Amino acid sequence: MDTWKENNNASTVQRVIVTVVGRDRVGIIASVSNLLAESNVNVLDISQTILQDFFTMIMVVDISKAKVSLQELQLLLKSKGEEIGVQIKAQHEDIFRYMHRI
Amino acid sequence: MPIAFTPAEISETIRMIETENLDIRTITMGISLRDCAHNDVNITARKIYDKITKKAEKLVNIGEDISKELGIPIINKRISVTPISMVGESCDDLNYFLLAETLDKAAKEVGVNFIGGFSALVHKGFTRGDEELIKAIPESLKATERVCSSVNIGTTKAGINMDAVKLMGKVVKETAELTKDKDALGCAKLVVFCNVPEDNPFMAGAFHGVGEPECVINVGVSGPGVVLNAIKNHPELDFGGLANIIKKTAFKITRMGELVGREAGKRLGVPFGIVDLSLAPTPAIGDSVADILEAMGLESVGTHGTTAALAMLNDAVKKGGSMASSYVGGLSGAFIPVSEDAGMIRGVEEGSLKIDKLEAMTCVCSVGLDMIAVPGETTAETISAIIADEAAIGMINKKTTAVRIIPVPGKQVGDRVEFGGLLGSAPIMPLHPYSSAAFIKRGGRIPAPICALTN
């Protein structure tokens, strides 16, 4: 059950921030994007930097039409991260909105 | 659609949580038990159990859901209830011990780690129930695991009930004696207050005040590590600049509390009460208020300048936090529990932090002499006198002060006690050797101060 969706008007966009951090290698973006597509999660924006071989990607995604709940998505991303050797987090955007926007 | 946040902002939030120990320290559900009174104590107990387990049934699960979805740790889920002295007072048999056991059972059933409210407010005098509850504290804290107790013995408006101060010295000693197999752990769950707030979500002093609604969600945020790092990154700033950095950081921390409190309230169908924006240290390295004071430029906490540094920190935290939440309450400020703060422990062990300086520090921060272990041979009168001093500071300065002191049986200065977990460990602190017994023996009430006469 996705309580966040229920409590926050399901028809609107549900934005989640996905952050991927790890050593750079071929196919990180592809595997994460694939997983998101399979779960019907829409990618709204991507920003990516590589600093001294260290790969950081921030994705803004919409889970309002997703086949899985946020918590399920977190688990899927976590195991994908372990598989390809990076750390993947997914957090509801509210935590960033509350901290950085008035 | 553009990314709504810069990568720097996103990584700042993640860094605060992952490396600087930013967390929501507690979601505390306040539950009124006023409707549980009955003249049969067994029925009262059953009503208390039923009400708590029904109201807080989903508290822990919902807390964990929110924590996962936002990606911020919520360390504790807790409950505070109406002072039990009032709830049990109508019983023919004033069996407060049974009610303590009931609270413990209910806490275990819903999975919260502490339940606060085995409390009495006696700043002007005792009712029959107050007296019986206070008598039952030592046995209750021995027999239960999760029950926390607090007693308010003074207010700015009423003065200080010195009879209660005298009694609480004995209660603290007796609690220590009864729980001596666990290094007097019972005393870590017992707070003596002056000007106690009615909406404090932090244990051990939380209870659900009489002016509070039926049920409410209060949130306590923490984050000494975040403030510490912010200060360390700006060694060149003067105090105006430093205060600004602390305010900004406190604002960001408190926003997390506001978000979690509102979301928890919404999901539980309970009004959101307040955010308590306290800097609550933990034994984790870097999560220390003492470290913040030292980062401001003091060689060791407790040295000259410590009070000024703490005053500035406490005030800046309040200013930043009060802008970040619609409702700020509870204790709100910096906590200085000795055993729970690695920097404070170091200060005591190195001899830079002494009881007198700690007392001075409590004049300018949010609580009082907190989690202080003292020699087991300390007399009840000396403990009462320590309580009286703290209460006087609270009464005159119109602020909350508290004493959570642990006279550990069989331990002397130089020894150390381990409480484990968030309660940490404490070196035994030396006290003044001179007696206060004749002073405490007087009894009666210290009249309300002139600053109380404001009407």
Image: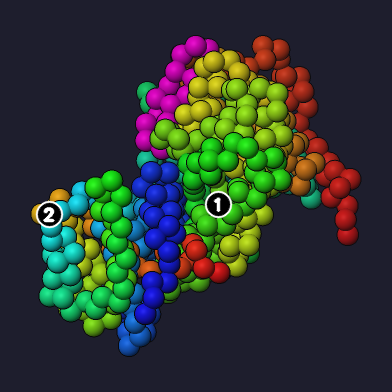
Could you tell me which quadrant the C terminus of chain A lies in?
Answer: bottom right
Residue B351 in which image quadrant:
top right
In reply to whether residue B177 is colored magenta, the answer given is: no
Q: Residue at x 18, y 79 (%)?
A: A40
- The residue under label 2 is which amino acid type? Ile
Could you tell me which quadrant the N terminus of chain A lies in?
Answer: bottom left
Q: Is residue B354 left or right of residue A18?
A: right
Q: In this view of the protein, which residue sits in the foreground, A101 or B186?
A: A101
Mark 1 and mark 2: Cα distance apart in space: 35 Å
Q: Residue at x 71, y 19 (%)?
A: B437
Mark 1 falls within which chain? B
Helix, strand or loop for disc 2: helix
Visible residue check, residue B164: no
Q: In this view of the protein, which residue sits in the foreground, B57 or B257?
A: B257
- The residue that mark 1 highlights is B249
- The residue that mark 2 highlights is A84
Closer to the camera: disc 1 or disc 2? 2
* Range of residues picked out in magenta: B413-428
Q: Is residue B389 left or right of residue A34?
A: right
Establish if B300 lies above or below B129: above
Residue B176 percent location from the top left of the image = 48, 26
Q: Residue at x 83, y 44 (%)?
A: B448
